[in-house]
Amino acid sequence: MAKLFGFSIDDGKSKSPSVISPVPKTNQDGVDNYISSGFYGSYLDIEGVYRTEHDLIRRYREMALHPECDGAIEDVVNEAIVSDLYDSPVEIELSNLNAGDALKKAIRQEFRNIKEILDFDRKAHEIFRNWYVDGRLYYLKVIDVKNPMEGIQDLRYIDPMKMKFVRQQKKEDPRTKIQVGAKGGAEGVNEPDIEEYFLYTAKPNYNSGMVAGSGAKRGSVKIAKDSVVYCSSGLVDRNKGTVLSYMHKAIKALNQLRMIEDSLVIYRLSRAPERRIFYIDVGNLPKVKAEQYLKEVMSRYRNKLVYDANTGEVRDDRKFMSMMEDFWLPRREGGRGTEITTLPGGQNLGELADIEYFQKKLYRALGVPESRIAADGGFNLGRSSEILRDELKFSKFVGRLRKRFSAMFNDMLRTQLILKNIVTPEDWESMGEHIQYDFLYDNQFAELKESEMIQSRLGNLATIEPYIGKFYSTEFVRKKILRQTDSEIEEIDNQIEDEIQKGILPDPSQIDPITGQPLPQGQDLGDVPQDQDLEAEAEVTDAEAQKDARKAEI
């Protein structure tokens, strides 16, 4: 346990001794600075916190099996991950990256390699769903230690129940009273040295919650931070320092829905049948004899023959009385005699307003529009301005999920590029922020909105076209007006060139730039035809000049 398993990437940066702070650097991911009780942090006691995380993850997974929750989760995952027959669910976007074409091509190739290792095109739905439900995702990066230049060889999924990210401050050496790794600074101020690693337990003890510990006896392995891909949901319980899932907000709503459904079933079973009330006239009989007479009448008219499925017999269960059976009440002399009346069942058994309320509350808690609860609920194929605000909010919510989920690709790509010596750790610090990921869209109004955006861009293009070459360049128009990315520009140019060679599009060199009509065969732009009228006038003028010259000679 003194050494970490895996590999670490050294960025080679050395902090200036003047840049100090008593506050350690954190990523605001819910991982506190756990203070270890042993020397060098060899023993870590996180009992309680880990148990809580196990219970939360278990509860999230149980909630995902509920039909209503499963439907809402599928709506979210289907919007975030779009499976297409020809296109990949996600592509890398390098338009904002200030780098050469060769470097961009290498980055795109390595990203495709990462997707192949993950088998992301085929397993994208399952990977995103696991991350959404659990609230965290772990992958172990497997490399060839003898030849790390080959990059990542395999990415192995790790159950979040077996993994814990630890950020811990090193303790003082009890012999020297010097904080291990502390950096000296101003007087009385030391910048704490933080150690970050992952703790993997193959067979954790879920009952006690103790999965961390020292040595092989505990069955725990410390793994270097750079050897594991860690992607969290971004939701943190700041009181307990625990990473939460997006399912956490729906725990109370789901429990309420379950209780109201169970109570509705009990109410309908008890109030649905119509029961009879038998008023038996007992005259002036004493109390004891009146009760005996009432029991005789009950046994005479009651029939409770039941079928025993275990033995195949038909037996009489008159000694048992259920809550749905008839009522037998004695009546004294002077009354109306023996009478039988009917007690009606429940009158509001068909009302489901409370069930629908809690279903809508559950969907709101999960961030899914309420209109998606109804199976027959459609949408209006009108303008994008007619789309409900709930759908717009849902689209933004899915966009935030995609942005957070993309951190997994960034981590994998960073390791792959550095191991293959394509970029240095220092270069990645400036490049990582400008790398974006483009997901396929399949929202209800995405196509409508895109169509309106194309119409608007083409309108702006028609307005600005007279000024191209004078105030605006072609590249500026394509990037700022038409909003085309570098990859799209390259792809479109290649397609146009290919279509010109195939004869689908006319050759621009054979088009008159003034009229836009094809030039005559054997004529290029340098041979500009003259106007026939001008030529005729020139011939008439020459003839008159010759006549005048002859007259002058005579």
Image: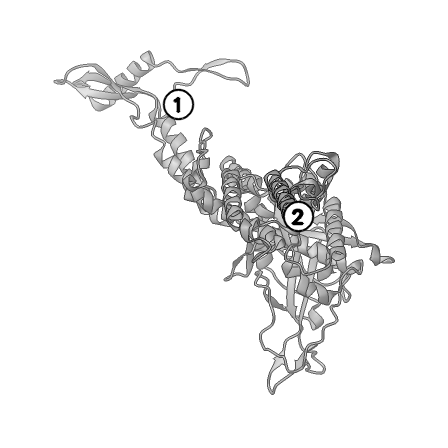
Is the residue 73 above or below the residue 285 in the image?
A: below
Label 2: few (<14), some (14–19) or many (≥20) C-alpha neighbours in 10 Å: few
Q: Could you tell whether 205 is left or right of 308 in the image?
A: right
Considering every residue shown, the one lying at the far right of the view is 146
Question: Which x, y percent locates residue 550?
Answer: 65, 45
Quadrant location of residue 275?
A: top left
Considering every residue shown, the one lying at the far bottom of the view is 187
Q: Which residue is mark 2?
A: 553
**Tag 1 near tag 2, CB within 8 Å:** no
Q: Nearer the viewer, residue 307 or 82?
A: 82
Q: Which residue is mark 1?
A: 320
Quadrant location of residue 130?
A: top right
Considering every residue shown, the one lying at the far left of the view is 334
Query: Which mark is nearer the camera, 1 or 2?
Result: 2
Distance, label 1 to label 2, CA atoms, is: 149 Å
Tag shown at residue 277: none
Q: Could you tell whether 538 is left or right of 385 in the image?
A: right
Q: Secondary structure at mark 1?
A: loop
Q: Amino acid at mark 2?
A: Glu
- The quarter of the rendered structure image containing the N terminus is bottom right
Question: Which x, y percent locates residue 529?
Answer: 66, 41
Is the residue 421 above or below the residue 19 in the image?
A: above
Question: Which x, y percent locates residue 180?
Answer: 70, 77
Quadrant location of residue 281?
A: top left
Q: Secondary structure at mark 2?
A: helix
Question: Which x, y percent locates residue 383?
Answer: 44, 38
